[in-house]
Each structure stands twice: as C-alpha cells, then as structure tokens.
Amino acid sequence: MSHIFLLAVASAFYPLLLAAVLLMLDTERPAPLLAAYLAGGVIVSVGLGVAILFALDRSGATSSSHQGTVSPAVDIAVGVLAVLVGLAMATGWDRRLRGKREKPAKTPPKEPWSSRVLSRGSPALAFVVGMVFSLPSFY
C-alpha cells in the first residue's frame, strides 16, 4: 500500500505540468489559459482511458479464463539488457559517449521556446498543450 502512496506523491510533482502551470500563472489573464489546459487534458485522459478499456474488453484480456504470459526468454533478455545498461553507467561508458556528442554552444542561449509560446496567452494553444501533456507517457 505504501508504494501506491509514493506513486501518488510522485505524480503530483509532474515537472511538465508544473512548468506549464507556472508559465500560465505568469501571464496577465491566467484563468482562461488554465481552464483551456484543464479541458484539453481531461478530454485526452478520459477519451484514451475509455478507448483502452473498450479495446482490452474486446480483446479478451480482461477475462479471467485468459492467462497469457511472456516467455522466459523475453524476461531473460530484458534482464540482461538492464544489467548491461547498469554496467555501462557504473563504468562511465555513457559519459564518454555523451562527451563525444556534445558540441560547444556558439551563441548565447535565448529564452526557451516554451516560455515564448505560452507567454502569448492563447487559450487555444493552452488547450493543445494540455492535450499533448496528457498523453500517456512513461512518467
């Protein structure tokens, strides 16, 4: 039960959501932006949730007679891959690869595009951002 509480607390601090809300609160009229953002998020979340439930129900994945499992080879392959990634990170191999890819910045950094776009105060844009940020993700 404690892991559910921990996940609930972690989901309350969704960084994209916090950044978007803070940017919208910094505008002259934040109420319409926040309402449009909430509407977009609710439409996507509820719509995708209902679609997933209908798809699972029609596929038979929710019936108790169907007990499909993944083969042991898949479990072993995922475990080996996880160990290899852990070893690469422990030995610093990932830092060496990142160092090869990084290029020095030639121009001074400008204001982030998210700040520029969201500071315009468009409810339609806030609606679209709410829809995009509410899509299922690994977080």
Image (cartoon, helix red, strand yellow):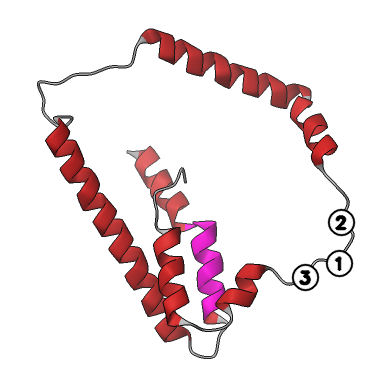
The image shows residue 46 at horizontal and vertical percentages of 25, 58
* Image marks 3 and 2: residues in contact by CB distance under 8 Å: no
In primary-sequence order, the first of circles 3 and 2 is 2
Magenta span: chief secondary structure: helix
* Disc 3 residue crowd, few under 14, some 14–19, many 20+, Cα 10 Å: few
Residue 8 vs residue 62: left or right?
right
Q: Residue at x 48, y 89 (%)?
A: 29
The image shows residue 125 at horizontal and vertical percentages of 47, 75
Q: Amino acid at mark 1?
A: Pro
Q: Amino acid at mark 3?
A: Lys
Label ID, residue 110: 3
Q: Amino acid at mark 2?
A: Ala
- Quarter of the N terminus within the rendering: top left
Q: Which residues are magenta?
A: 13-24
- As measured in the structure, the alpha-carbon distance from the residue carrying label 1 to the one carrying label 2 is 7 Å
The image shows residue 51 at horizontal and vertical percentages of 22, 49
Please determine whether, in this image, residue 96 is positioned above or below residue 117.
Answer: above
* Image marks 3 and 1: residues in contact by CB distance under 8 Å: yes
- As measured in the structure, the alpha-carbon distance from the residue carrying label 3 to the one carrying label 2 is 12 Å
Question: Where is residue 52, by image quadrant?
Answer: top left
Residue 118 vs residue 12: left or right?
right
Instruction: Name the residue that disc number 1 marks.
Output: 108
* Image marks 1 and 2: residues in contact by CB distance under 8 Å: yes
Instruction: Name the residue that disc number 2 marks.
Output: 105
The image shows residue 31 at horizontal and vertical percentages of 42, 85
Label ID, residue 98: none
- As measured in the structure, the alpha-carbon distance from the residue carrying label 3 to the one carrying label 1 is 6 Å
Q: Residue at x 59, y 75 (%)?
A: 117
Q: Within the magenta stretch, is there residue 19?
A: yes
Q: Quick one: SS at disc 1?
A: loop
